[in-house]
Image (cartoon, coloured by chain):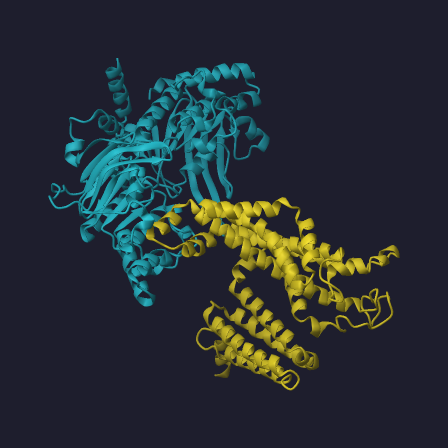
Chain colours: A yellow, B cyan
Amino acid sequence: MTMTMSKEAFGGNASPWVSRIAMAAIHFFILVLFLQNVTADTWSSIIGLLFAHLYSVVALTYWSRIERTPAGDTVVVALTLEFVLVAIIFWDRASAWPWSTMFGLALVQICAFAAVRYWKELRGAPASAWFGLIVILIYVMVAATAPIIAPFGETEIVGSEYDVWSNKHLLGTDNLGRDMFTRIIYGGRNTVGIAFATTVLAFVLGGLAGLLAAAMRGWVDQILGRSVDILMAIPSFIFALLILTIVGTSVPSLILVIGILDATRVFRLARAVSMNVVVLEFVEAASLRGEGLWWIIRSEILPNILPPLVAEFGLRFCFVFLFLSSLSFLGLGIQPPTADWGSMVRDNATLITYGDITPLLPAAAIALLTVGVNFVVDWFLHKASGLKD
Amino acid sequence: MNDATIGEVILDMRGLRIEGRSDEIWHEIVHGIDVTLHRGEVLGLIGESGAGKSTIGLAAMGFARDGCRISGGSIMFDGVDLAKASDDGLRQLRGSRIAYVAQSAAAAFNPAHKLIDQYCEAPVQHGIMPRAEAESDAIDLYRRLQLPGPDTIGFRYPHQVSGGQLQRAMTAMAMACRPDLIVFDEPTTALDVTTQIEVLSAIREIVRQFNTAAIYITHDLAVVSQMADRIMVLRHGNLVEEGETRGMIEDPQKDYTRDLLAVRTFRKDTADSPGADMPLLRVEGVSAAYGKVPVLYDVSMDIHRKRTVAVVGESGSGKSTMARVITGLLPPSQGQVFYDGLPLPLDHRKRNKDEKRRLQMIYQMPDTAINPRQRVSAIIGRPLEFYLGLRGADRTARVRELLEMIELDPDEFIDRYPGELSGGQKQRVCIARALAAEPELIICDEVTSALDQLVAEEILKLLQRLQDELGLAYMFITHDLATVRAIADEIVVMLQGKIVEQGPKQQVLSPPHHEYTELLLSSVPEMDPDWLDNLLDDRQGENA
């Protein structure tokens, strides 16, 4: 009896008991996580609790809606429980950084959900795409749970300068005696996080403007188009240097400046691909039906230009990443003592003279992510364009 | 045609099997077909889309499209097995001894080069003749194909000549190396009836002159009966029937062939004379222009409730522009459109929801008329929500009702994407979307011309049934007179932006005709192998 029940539970359709219980357990776990911190920092704990509730509701709703398979259910439950188990084993760290733990948990679940939902496509993905996906997943996990997995503090000086690789300092120390391994982990969080925020901003701004220009044409198109032309006429690197020198190099100003500069490229792409869709008859049919501009943009045009936009998102993300790193290398990017891969290369460049590859590791981290993202983008483009080999 | 010219076997395909790849699995799409072709013989391949006729035509050149492969059988061309030949060997043959004429000449020509440059490419490449000789040869062929200004037309770019001329230029190009075999893949499908005649007679003439063997692929039995000595009827990659043209037309053996022959026999019941009531739609003295180019001159017409008005004319006659004026996409420079006696705002953006709801449109190309990223339920459901405020379960129930109305099984189709539908099914979904708005008048812009004949006829029957049940009025824009015969109550004949004749069907279709109507009517191919000969003789006689 019990056997059949649990089997059914994993089967998902008839009785989602196991998944419900698993979800409830996780909910409880997050509560404890934040309650641990109530005395230390009341407000963040309260907000954290609210988020935890909200998150659980969303996760449970989604869980009950998606098309699931027994294997998929098992994967989601198993991965989640495993994460919780790891967090319990390292309870000190997990409870000290409840936000990181929660985000890590959310990420694990999102990835597992996505894997189950899109298993059919994923199974057919080439090895390069799998490689890319795994690289991205690792980076994102590391970024989310940086304080938990890093052995030292981000800016903590823990040893002598330029220490060699050892058991205590896996990758040695940097020019100020900070742990290199820790810095690389935190660097991932800062650089990837800022690059991601910048790219999202660029796509929201540029994509929306491009869609508007294509859908409305006339003077809207002219004004948007010419403004973009002006922005593009100035070499973007010089322009960014100029503006950052004026407004200062805080993180928000970095995101804004690079975001706006990159939005011009996104605008041109979004406008060009939308133009091809706007002339199709189903758009005409929608406007004859009397649909508003927003509907036409959101429901008729956007879904049809999504594949090239997503592909561009991947590429743009890499460009922003490199742009940020080169700004940091010049000292105008993310400011010390915040860890950042670009400036880490510069700070430790001296070591290269002595044949030490440590300063190249952050550069390698950049390269690896760029390659991974591009593999995934290639795969996506290949799928979206309907090419068959 | 005459047995004396038919010589030895030039092409012999035995047990041809072709596989296509979808979802990572190979499916057989041609199941062991035998094709034998003699020198100087024209073989017609006919069937609906998906029958494998183009695939077989291409296989005759040893070619399989992307995602397809020749998986079995032999293709003996003059003693060489093309199925086993090397790429190099095939390249030697293609263009010089086997040539191909594609359906859309406009898409097959490179727009960046002049016609004659593209003509000369093959003979020069294959080392058959030097450039200068090839040029004079091209001019000779252009003359034989009765292209206007044969000495100069080759020095134009593809976009500078008309569709029919382009198709003939393409035929000339295929002839450049005097091949032993030409594959014609639906060369006239995209053309008007009047242009089709010119291209058909030109092709037939040139094939006879050079005693070339040809494979003529089409879905139009009437056309193929003019061209071919022998016909193969194909369906789902299988041979249905094979035989001499005349024999097959007069005495088909298989049901499917009979269906193909019987197509276009559908007629609606004779309609009563138009009521004296107020017309549902009145177009009064409308002139319209694209920018500065005038397209419509002082056009007036009425459409009454529950009646079908067919607007006929060749491309460029302004019939689609008329639809754009009525729907408000192109505000006319002069004139007025009345709906139910009241003037309709000329710009569609100024019309209210109800005015828009009552006037719906169905497009020619179902592929582009529905959003490929929306499910059928969303496509049909949106007008329900937008115009009638239906939501949730009500909306779904109504979508299912509409799907039943257009003869698609709701359980099977409601969650599909357009990519998972056939052409005819897509057009049905377009019809359902128009019906969802509960309109009074539907403008049908060439709704059947992108479809196979059998499918097209089903669509016409569906539209007719819906008219009987729901009391709709149709404005039916078409260049196909068979469609007009089938479905119209009244006919409007247009030429160069003017109406040359209009009235009830019987009146327009029975003599005396306006001369342009006569030209259109006589150009509709008939299922009679002698039709083209007789027609050309007639026209020759008139001109002489």
Residue drawn at the location 64% of the way across and 85% of the way down: A36
Does residue A291 sit above or below B17 in this rendering? below
The spot of residue B365 in percent (x, y) is 36, 43
Q: Quadrant of the N terminus of chain B?
A: top left
| Residue A32 in sight | yes
User: Depth check: B64 or B339 in front?
Assistant: B339
Q: Quadrant of the C terminus of chain B?
A: top left
The spot of residue B262 in percent (x, y) is 24, 38
Q: Quadrant of residue B480?
A: top left
User: Depth check: B308 or A343 in front?
Assistant: A343
Residue drawn at the location 55% of the way across and 18% of the way down: B128
Residue drawn at the location 44% of the way across and 26% of the way down: B160
Q: Quadrant of residue A172?
A: bottom right
Residue A120 in the figure: left or right of residue B280: right
Residue A40 in the figure: left or right of residue B323: right
Residue lying at the far front of the rendered structure: A246
Residue drawn at the location 69% of the way across and 54% of the way down: A322
Residue lying at the far top of the rendered structure: B544
The spot of residue A157 in percent (x, y) is 81, 72
| Residue B126 in sight | no
Residue lying at the far bottom of the rendered structure: A39
User: Depth check: A208 or B248 in front?
Assistant: A208
The spot of residue A155 in percent (x, y) is 77, 70
Counting every numbered tag in the picture gives 0
